[in-house]
Image: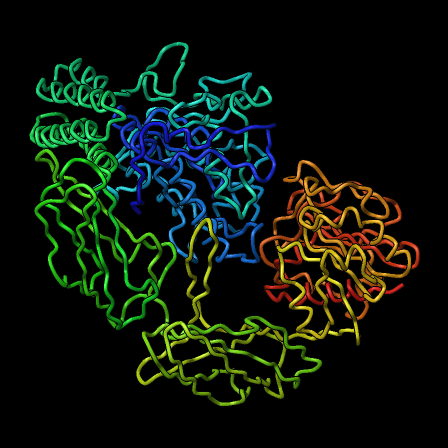
Amino acid sequence: MIKGKSTSKFCSIVMSAVLAGGMLLPAQAQPAYADRGVVDLWKSIKPLTTIASAMNTGAHPDDEHSATLAYLSLGRGVNTSSVIAVRGEGGQNEIGSELGQALGIIRTRELQEASKITNVTLGMLGEQLDDPIYDFGFSKSVEETLEKWGDSVAYERLIRKIRELRPDVIIPSFLNEASTHGHHRTINVLTVRAFKDAANPEIFPEHLKQGLQPWQIKKLYLPANAKDYTVNAPIGDYNEIYGASYLQLGEESRFMHKSQGMGKVYDEGPVQGDLFSNYYKLDLSAVKSADKEKDFFDGIAFTFEDLAKEIDAKGKDNKIVKHLRELQKDADEVVAAYPSFAKVLKEVHDMKADVQTALADVKASGLEAATKEDLLHRLHVKEEQLNKASMESASVVAKVKPAASELVAGQTTKVTVSAFNGGSVKLNKINLSLNVPSGWTAKPAGATSFDQLGYNETASATFEVTIPANARLFKPYDPSVFNAKVEYQAYDTATTLKVTPQNGVAVLPPYSMSLSPNATILNTLKSQEPIPVKVTVRNYTPGASKATVSLNVPEGWTAEPAAEELSFATKGETKSVAFTVKAASNVVPGKFTVTAVAKNGDVQSTQGAQVIEYPHIGKTYMVQPAELKIQAFDLKVPDKLKVGYVSSGFDNIDQYLRQVGVDVVKLEAKDIQYGDLSQYDTIVLGIRAYAFRPELIPSNQRLLSYVQNGGNLVVQYHKPEDKWSPELAPYPIKIGSPLIQWRVTDENSKVTMLAPDHPMFNSPNKITDQDWSNWIQDRSAYNPSEWGKEYTALISNGDPGEKEFTGTFLTARYGKGVYTYSSLVWYREIPALVPGSIRMFVNMISQKQ
């Protein structure tokens, strides 16, 4: 995406970036922003001064070493990349209720926006939804991670990224230590292994047939500390042009990871004496450098002059040496011309011409193959960087604007490609074109070429785009379905810009359907109770339309009505149909699926498009089958059970309790602070509620009094940093530390019921070993390490080969009531309709005095 630019003079770089106050400022404080006028110009020309490259590898979005990336990319101009393994779909969500793949989409978009801020090239090993490389939740080992990802799959993709991006320096974000997340350890192990293997043509030889070449990374650094390190990244250094330190700039990017609660606002300069530098220790090297290294790139060519010296020392092609020294002079002159946009533009185009000449001569040279390949790669990188520098210095704003961003197969729409010249230099030979997928057509409706473009003028071309009937539906991790090419000349040298729409363009189902509920429980003790299903249909077809909506149900089941016709007046209109589904009379426990179908002649839709939209990432979609998942099993629920649910915003357990007949009321702050709590048989606190419901701690005594007077209080897991203190419970509960060692990640691990005769396992549902089967992702998180003797420890459980925890599920009488603290991951199991988890949760909220 190429954004609009300000052409303000140098004074604009101040940008209100001064940060005042303490280390962590109040909420109204803003991070530093480096995305305006001459600052963007500097960001585009600084990379021209170096031919060096670096890569940071991590497991999840937000694993990147943001401040170091800002230092390398924004500070030194190094061609910097970040390669991340998974999309983060196994994590938690601090801004909404999306989990699983929907959360992965959010975290991917956050990572993309974060990478833009630090001017970093992003690579992902997990390529699609349902990818083998996925975030399956917390892992304690490399072995488990590689077993789930597939060792060869993950390794091939990492080697591929290294051979594509060819970093001189590589830095994994984490060490391979037992106290570290297994995903983090795995990326460390793979990165260290790849140091040599990426250079070995016998490792994944298919890459060579695909045009990639082996690549020897020069150095590998590991994270270190101030007492034992080789080099440091001075992230506390203040950069006058950006008006911020690299730590501040890195945090600006981390603010994009809002779903993980990332980002802090720091003062300028050293912070607590420890955040002035990031430290790294040299682990592997293929070059000889000084005895006492001072820099990541000691012993590595950093400039064109360094490359020229290397080739000259080998007694090789003097012509190439001369070209490289000319490019060094060009880069120096570009920087010297800053901050004059017009002067920079001229020097940039002079350098572009010299790069073209150098490329031709290197291709024709007799240099050895590896040297030639290396030079060609670095020169092609410079080509791309010079195109961006030309755009910034010419003050070109290039855009591609579709008439509609939500499309359907078979539709025709208009797309406009434009180029605006905000600079003082006239541009020549402007060409505008639109690239569309195979099978699509894009016909220009007028001129696409223009002789000149002067100051404050815009050239635009409109294309009529036809989407074929078999067009693939939107996939969130695919590139944009179309992009534009904007070409122009300045000083007799051409620039080519690739432009994508500012907002995402999606091919969606003609009738997008969502079912409410989309997952539910069928109680086989009441199997003939009807299941109400509402199908909401959004019309994405252009204009007025009609569709007949029906449900496909399992054999022997029924749906009433059989079908319903909906009429839509306009695109985007939404209507709903209410159905009643009944199970077969002989239904048995198991899983069942109901699918919605919308038909209009030959057009049929069985899918829905979940809209995912937040201000910091814009709008995107997840296209998925329009289905209702039904889990049938036996469940006893007390009559007239009334529950007050205190949600932290991280789960939707309350909606599943309603489905099984529990009267659930979501409690607001005023209810907790002043309301009559005695009207509830049970009050449930969602995961980490003390951290996200500020009224809870001041009202905690009210909750404990509620228990003393006969209430049933259920508290789900917390982290110590969630403002949890042992005294919040009626009898102290201390959460284990370090947290990584106090969780059970194997969802199939053996569970022993320590108190099988306890009411928790017997009323109203009899809990057996079978109820611990078919769990997903984890068993428990952040288990207590110490607790009062008043509690009954209900279960013991641990990962294979490890000591078992007995504090996972604690309950105690307190006064006339019951207090239960549970670290079991109910918020994952219940939406997944795991029968045992639902039966136990109902038991937990049914405890009586």
The quarter of the picture where residue 392 lies is top left
Report the side of 125 relative to 402 (left or right). right
Residue 218's x, y, as percent? 33, 24
The quarter of the picture where residue 788 lies is top right
Number of numbered discs: 0
Residue 848's x, y, as percent? 86, 65
Residue 481's x, y, as percent? 28, 58
Residue 269's x, y, as percent? 52, 21
Query: Which residue is at the front of the view, 86 or 542?
Result: 542
Q: Residue at x 16, y 15 (%)?
A: 314
- Farthest residue to the right: give it: 815
Query: Which residue is at the front of the view, 232 or 444?
Result: 444
Report the side of 607 relative to 45 (left or right). right
The quarter of the picture where residue 284 lies is top left
Q: Residue at x 11, y 57 (%)?
A: 447
Report the side of 648 relative to 223 (left or right). right
Asked if one can make out residue 195 in the rendered structure from this viewpoint, the answer is no
- Farthest residue to the top: give it: 291
The quadrant of the rendering that contains the C terminus is: bottom right
Asked if one can make out residue 285 in the rendered structure from this viewpoint, the answer is yes
Q: Is residue 168 above or below residue 501?
A: above
Q: Is residue 561 above or below residue 339?
A: below
Q: Residue at x 44, y 49 (%)?
A: 108
